Image: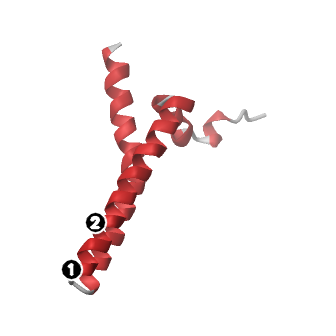
């Protein structure tokens, strides 16, 4: 039971990080292109949007499939699961 909770939390964080890291890269590009006050505000807005998107996405996957089942679907290999005749 404890292991399911731990792995569920780890997979929830991994699902959350997908859109968050993308927004982090975009925010870094915004700040590095022109480091002004407005670019910092735009980067903070992009990071906030990435955080909200990541949270919503991770919670939807947890509620709909479960994080362990969702990540299992992503990691399955069709070559192994297919029967060979």
| Res. 64 image quadrant | top right
Q: In the rendering, which numbered label is found on residue 15?
A: none
From the viewer's perspective, is residue 25 above or below residue 78? below
Q: Position of residue 26 (x, y in %)?
A: 36, 71
For mark 2, what is the residue?
44
Q: Nearer the viewer, residue 30 or 14?
A: 30
Write the residue at 64% across / 42% down.
Answer: 79
Q: Are marks 1 and 2 in contact (CB under 8 Å)?
A: no
Judging from the image, what secondary structure is the residue with disc 1 in?
helix
Write the residue at 50% across / 29% down.
Answer: 66
Write the residue at 28% across / 66% down.
Answer: 44
Q: Quadrant of the N terminus?
A: top left
Judging from the image, what secondary structure is the residue with disc 2 in?
helix
Q: Nearer the viewer, residue 54 or 69?
A: 54
Image mark count: 2
Q: Residue furthest right?
A: 85
Q: Earlier in the sequence, mark 1 or mark 2?
A: 1
| Res. 14 image quadrant | top left
Q: Residue furthest top?
A: 1
Q: Position of residue 8 (x, y in %)?
A: 38, 28
Q: Rate crowding at label 2 as few (under 14), some (14 to 19) or many (20 or more) other CA atoms within 10 Å.
A: some
From the viewer's perspective, is residue 32 above or below residue 57? below
Q: Position of residue 10 (x, y in %)?
A: 33, 35
Q: Quadrant of the C terminus?
A: top right
From the viewer's perspective, is residue 32 above or below residue 17? below
Q: Nearer the viewer, residue 48 or 8?
A: 48
For mark 1, what is the residue?
37
Q: Is residue 34 visible?
A: yes
Q: Position of residue 50 (x, y in %)?
A: 38, 57
Write the residue at 35% across / 52% down.
Answer: 51
């Amino acid at each position: 039971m404890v292991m399911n909770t731990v792995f569920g939390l780890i997979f929830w964080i991994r699902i959350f990080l997908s859109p968050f890291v993308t927004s982090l890269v975009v925010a870094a590009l915004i700040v590095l292109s022109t480091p002004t006050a407005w670019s910092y505000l735009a980067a903070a807005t992009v990071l906030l949007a990435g955080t909200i998107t990541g949270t919503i996405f991770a919670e939807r996957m947890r509620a709909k499939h479960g994080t362990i089942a969702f990540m299992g679907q992503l990691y399955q290999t069709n070559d192994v699961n297919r029967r060979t005749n």
